[in-house]
Image (spheres, grey):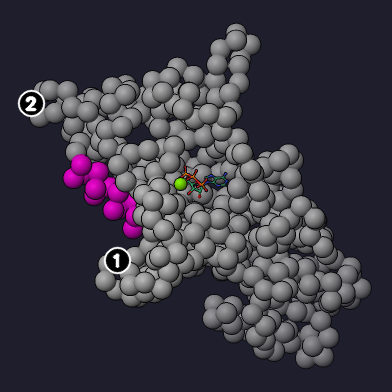
Amino acid sequence: MLFSKLLIPTLKEAPQEAEIVSHKLMLRAGMIRKVASGIYTWLPLGLKVLKKIENIVREEMDASGAQEVFMPMVQPRELWEETNRWEKMGPELLRIKDRHDRDFCLGPTHEEVITDIIRDNVKSYKELPLNIYQIQTKFRDEVRPRYGIMRGREFLMKDSYSFNNDEESLQETYLLMRETYKKILERIGLDYKISAADSGAIGGDSSEEFHVLAENGEDTIAVSDASEFAINTELLLKDGEDIKSLEGKPSPDGKGIIQIKKGIEVGHIFKLGKLYAESMKANVLNSDGKAQVLCMGCYGIGVSRLVAASIEQNYDEKGIVWPHSIAPFDINIISIGHDKNKDIEKASMKLYKDLTKMNYSVLLDDRKDGYGKKIKDSELIGIPLNIIVGNKYLENEEVELLARNGESSINPVSDLKTILDFFKTK
Ligand code: ATP
Ligand code: MG
């Protein structure tokens, strides 16, 4: 991609409205722009990162054996009446009417729609278990949308729903999803904790949240410093416990000391049991030919929130430091004097084509600006590796490799292998 042709409206200063670092940097890097409160347009750079995360989520979901579908965003009132959630959801559910005065809502989640599909189309216990997922826009009329896409009203979620014959099978799928979420967060390269959680408006028997640890997290979690023990303090408050009494105390699992941390909830997995299946009469015939109520699980991961959460964990005073797995481009070729010197232009274009052919996603900064502006922009938008084609090329046909972490080396432009090895180790 040529920088001069891309819509990347970078900003020197973050607009006043941005309070936390990820929101500031997403605006400054030209990744998103606000359309209305909690509603954003994803510009090319932001969309590239969003799609990278979406792909990681999709690959891991497919590898787990889950099947992808695409459900409508607009859902009829009747389905929500069946679970009593038309009333229960309150003002977070955005309700609309069609031209015939019929009630609909914009889907904040899809338990009703998917359970309706399964009850109509799956008849025998032999067809289970099933795990169905989608990656789709959700709408929740949040009381306090804030922090940009971190808490939007419109956001992208991967939601999946499992249908099982019994609790034992549900437990198996639940653990498989738990492992799948771990793989997703590890592939992105995030530091996270899995905490026992309150099941909120989704309900069900029990649930766990995946928290990316970051100072700006909205959740407070109690974690052990020596084991995997973690619990959302929301759950403790609900049970009347006192958070302060936990701080510095031995962990309830007998390993380590409790510390209080801030976390961003990026995923939430639930054992729903028969909650929705009972109210929506979702049954299959069991081996005796008798109707048996389905057991369900549901598993959500905030695809768009993960973009912001990744920034909260990976930035410095210059800008974003993307983990390689989700960087919008792998390499930025900074061509100094691109418009003035044919040799520089030719060498930069050759490098650009060669690296692109090798399946790297490459940005070529061919703008008229000088080195200062170009490197500042590159650091702001967080590209892992810069290749600087300038004076050293004119002198000795050499280029400077400059990683986002500051490490650098000088190499002959023809030595692609060294360039790529350098990229891989940074
Ligand atoms: P929160 O406690 O942050 O409001 P939630 O418990 O309402 O989230 P779930 O219903 O568990 O959220 O949704 C699954 C995932 O969707 C969450 O773990 C989160 O990553 C994401 N998500 C939920 N609400 C939003 C939002 N308003 N903006 C962006 N992502 C969201
Ligand atoms: Mg939740």
Q: Residue at x 43, y 19 (%)?
A: 81
The part of the chain drawn in magenta is 167-182
In the picture, which quadrant includes the C terminus?
bottom right
Q: Give percent across and percent down for residue 254.
A: 26, 71
179 drawn magenta = yes
Is 274 in front, or is 185? 274
Apparent side of residue 9 relative to residue 148 in the rendered image (left or right): right
Q: Residue at x 19, y 38 (%)?
A: 166
The answer to which image quadrant residue 414 occupies is bottom right
Q: Above or below — where is 348 with respect to 126?
A: below
Apparent side of residue 175 relative to residue 302 in the rendered image (left or right): left
Is 227 in front, or is 346? 227
- Residue 252 numbered tag: 1
Is 216 in front, or is 242? 242
In the picture, which quadrant includes the N terminus?
bottom right
Kindly report the distance in space between the C-alpha atoms of the residues bearing marks 1 and 2. 44 Å
Q: Give percent across and percent down for residue 291.
A: 17, 23
Q: Give percent across and percent down for residue 15.
A: 80, 56
Residue under numbered circle 2:
288
Residue sitting farthest toward the right: 340
Q: Main secondary structure of the magenta part?
A: helix
Q: Amino acid at mark 1?
A: Pro
